[in-house]
Image: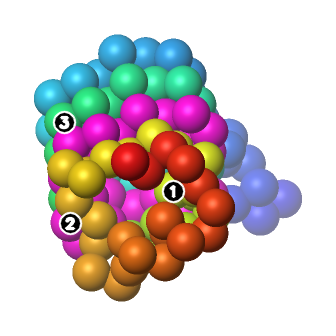
Amino acid sequence: MLKSETRAAAPKLDIRGAFVRRTDLSGVSLLGADLSGADATNATFRGADFAGAILRKTVLRGADLTGAKNLTKKQLAEAVIDEHTILPDYIDRNILSTNGSDNHK
């Protein structure tokens, strides 16, 4: 057996429905994490890695996503954001609102 085969897979973060308002999650790896329905109002995600994260109905009102990595428009379309949500530079807020998503206002 290869050394990598003997290691157990790292568990993925599961905070479905959790209340994480104003929590500082800067720089964390949210690789494959499930944040469905979590309330992350005014939370800080500076530099966090969102690769494969599930953001279905995740409340990101007022959240700071500055420098977030691997965050997609599709993920944000499933989340709840507002005009106070700080998006990473590579995501254009105007494109999000023209994709038919009503949850950004």
Q: In this rendering, would 46 be left or right of 68?
A: left
Q: Is residue 76 above or below residue 58?
A: below
Q: Which residue is mark 3?
A: 42
Q: Quadrant of residue 77?
A: bottom right
Vertical order, 57 against 93 (above or below): above
Q: What is the chief secondary structure element of the magenta stretch?
A: loop
Which residue corresponds to mark 1?
A: 76
Which amino acid, by three-letter code, is at mark 3? Asn
Expressed as whole percent of the image width and height from the top left, the position of residue 61 reads 29, 39
Q: Which residue, given by chain and number where applicable, does mark 2 sit on?
A: 66
Looking at marks 2 and 3 on the same chain, the residue that comes earlier in the sequence is marked by 3
- Residue 74: image x %, image y %? 63, 63
Is the C-beta separation of discs 3 and 1 under 8 Å? no
Helix, strand or loop at label 3? It is loop
Q: Is residue 24 above or below residue 96?
A: above
Side (left or right) of 61 relative to 34: left
Q: Pick whichever of labels 3 and 1 is earlier in the sequence.
A: 3
In the orientation shown, which residue stands out farthest toward the right? 1
Residues in magenta, as a range: 47-68
User: Is residue 33 visible from the viewing direction of this image?
Assistant: no
Q: Residue at x 43, y 50 (%)?
A: 104
Q: Residue furthest bottom?
A: 90
